[in-house]
Amino acid sequence: MKKYFFLFVIFMGLILRIFYLNQKEHTKYLELLNQKRINYVVGSSAPRGRILDRNGIVLVDNIGVKTIYYQKLKGITLKDEIDIANKLASIIDIEINNNSLKKYWLITHDNGNSLITEEENKLWEMRKLSNDDIKSLKNERITEEMLNELTELEKKSATIYDLMNKGYSYDKKMIKKGMSDTQYSKIIDENIKGITVELTWDRIYNYEGVLDDILGRVGSIPKEEKEEYLKKGYNLNDIVGLSFLEKEYEDYLKGEKTLYKIKEDNTLEVLKEGKKGHDITLSIDIRVQLKLEELLRENILKAKRYKNTDYFTESYSIVGNPLTGEIIALAGQKLTGTINNPTFKNVNTNLFSSSYTVGSVVKMATISTGYKYGVIDIGTEMTDGCIKLYQVPIKCSYKSLGKVSDLTAISKSSNYYQFRIALGIAGASYYYNMKLNTEKEDFDKFRNTFKEYGLGNLTGIDLPNEKIGIIGSGTSSDLLLNLTIGQYDTYTPMELFQYVNTVASSGEKRKPQLMKYINNNDNIINNPYNVVGEVSLAPKYLARLKDAMHLATQSGTARNYILSKYNPAGKTGTSETFIDTNNDGVMDTKTTSMAFVGFAPYDNPLYSVIVLAPNIYVAKDYNYSKIYITRYISQGITNFLFENM
């Protein structure tokens, strides 16, 4: 009895479940069934967002290209598709694909049955030859002479027919991209079954050759990133940002493609209209950018007319707003031709991926280390001279500077003053030919302070593949002294830019940035100017550094690098460098590089500038005072900024 009762309960449970599914959940499961049965497709492309400069000038845009698509309708026969291909072939030009000709020949010649012998047919019927075997035999027996009998129109039709039948039957197939207005009109007039003409979008760069390696490029999804994009909902034939800004802001720039439902007759119904991607406005001013590139090219050629500049080929500069980190213009130009037949190459990516020995421009960070550890204070004076350590060549300033303080050690660029700070950090009192024992901790004290300014770490610029310079691993006494005057570790131009901005903003370190704001369907997304670090010094010391740089532009080594009427502050740098001239891995030639960092006005900064000229000359005793490339560039671009902004 219990057994029958148990079966009754199970039976009633099943009846109730069936009733529930049929009555209560009917609509839900019907919708799920319909979703499984309905196919959806997306449009071919959607326009990407534009990239504009700070004044609204369009740098990167889209251009609509008339593109022919084929969508297979319900009831379309093989003969219909051949007719469609023939009609299109009579209207458009298309590059003939020879691989398509054999397929077309077979279709238009009774599937090539005449190419198979009776004996082979019998073997096929006996299953001793497969369908693939028969297909291979047919293809092998189609001769060049047979294909040459096809007319040019038939060859075009063959290519078009092949394109019409690639992929899934319900997919829209692209037949041809780009056509004349006459061809477009004829296709519309013919009203060919399944054929539509739509606008697809190509990327155009309105200032071709300007900032091309910063703006980046678009293209097909790279194989190595396929899985990542598929997870985000992309199709494998989508166009994506491949490099730099196009890639960095892909999530905003990409458009939303139109979504279609395929109806029972294979026609399409729009479910969701596509949308253009979001526009991005940069902090770049294209007027300043063009001027900066022009100045670099002019002055590279001017410097190359002097002797001993054999290995000088490139210069770099960045200008921006020191209080926000915004970049107004950035440029790297490399001479690839000759003086008489000059051609130049953009090497803008070196600004954040290659590093250089920068020399005395680091001395504000060195002085800061002296303040921080109590080695010097405001007003500390000493008489400039030379340092001679045991088994180390004598080290001096570029000339005898007399009595110097923390102010004049920067404005006159005293090496001796920086060396004495190094001795103090190492806990030593100087005497001639002394042995100086240095530890890693001594180097760390300098480097940690340098990093607070932006020297020796990533700046956070909104571009992929940023690198830092080379951090030396040696800890000898000679190297510690070199570190204090910018002759040991190397830094990227972008690190220099962040460094001078940090000095200008009284110790507040911000990320350099190119994106100013994103127009998200009339909702503006601003790029915040966040402080990412601060220099651990009292305000009086930070103000003292700015005073020293101001003095340098009035009566010191940076005089006239920015005209005094703009009330500037700045610091020059000259460094000994070495290059490998015959690519054998040995640094065989001694060169000199030059740098400048500055801002103006020094008490209320509006603009900052860095200029770098690596390997400007080679002769040891050569009088380089006439090669004013860094001065000409910095003066030229700051004049332009103050007169035109």
Image: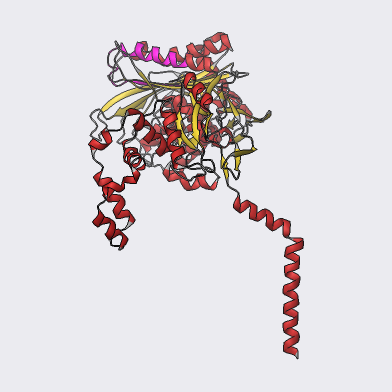
From this view, report whether residue 306 is shown above or below residue 502: above
Using the rendered image of the protein, determine whether residue 589 is visible from the camera's viewpoint.
yes
Residue at image position (35%, 13%) is 301
Could you tell me which quadrant the N terminus lies in? bottom right
Q: Position of residue 86 (x, y in %)?
A: 41, 31
Magenta highlight on residue 230? no
Could you tell me which quadrant the C terminus lies in? top right
Number of numbered discs on residues: 0
Q: Relative to 232, is 306 on the left or the right?
A: left
Magenta highlight on residue 314? yes
Q: Position of residue 473 (x, y in %)?
A: 38, 42
From this view, report whether residue 315 is shown above or below residue 71: above
Front position in the image: 114 or 314: 114
Front position in the image: 552 or 198: 198
The magenta segment? 291-317
Using the rendered image of the protein, determine whether residue 362 is visible from the camera's viewpoint.
no
